Image (cartoon, helix red, strand yellow):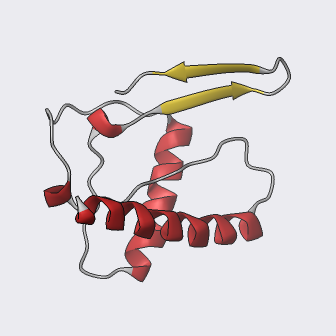
Amino acid sequence: MEGMFNDLRVSLDTMSHYKTRERADDAKKAAEINVRVLTPTNWPTQGDEQSTLTKHLQSMKQEFESWYLARHTGRKLTWPSYLVSTQLLNCTQSLTILLGRG
C-alpha cells in the first residue's frame, strides 16, 4: 500500500512539472491530459485490451511520453486501457459528462 501512495505522490509532482512546461508552450490548449505513472507491481491488474484513441489524444499521449522518457532514461511506459477515465466538459453549457473506465 505504501508503494501506491508513493506512486500517487510522484505522479502529482510529475504532472506539476509537465503542466508548467505545457503552459509555457501553449496556454490555449483545448484539452488537458492528466497522467499517473504507476509501478505495475504496486497495483492490481486486469485484462490487457487496448482502446483506440482519437488523433488528438494520441498526439497528447506521444507528447507526454517524449517529455517523460527524455527525463527518465531506461524506463518504459505502458497504457493499460482499464485504468483510463475520461472527463468531458462543455464550459459553454456548464455540462459535465463523466465517461466510465475503459
Image vertical order of residue 62 relative to residue 95, above or below: below
Image quadrant where residue 97 sits: top right
Judged from this view, the residue extending furthest toward the front is 1
Q: Nearer the viewer, residue 51 or 7?
A: 7
Q: Nearer the viewer, residue 49 or 93?
A: 93
Q: Residue at x 83, y 17 (%)?
A: 93
Q: How many marks?
A: 0
Image vertical order of residue 5 relative to residue 86, above or below: below
Image quadrant where residue 89 sits: top right
Q: Residue at x 49, y 61 (%)?
A: 64
Q: Residue at x 56, y 48 (%)?
A: 33
Q: Residue at x 51, y 60 (%)?
A: 63
Point out the image quarter for the N terminus: bottom left
Left of 79 or right of it: where is 54? right
Judged from this view, the residue extending furthest toward the right is 92
Q: Residue 46: x and y, percent?
A: 15, 35
Image quadrant where residue 5 sits: bottom left
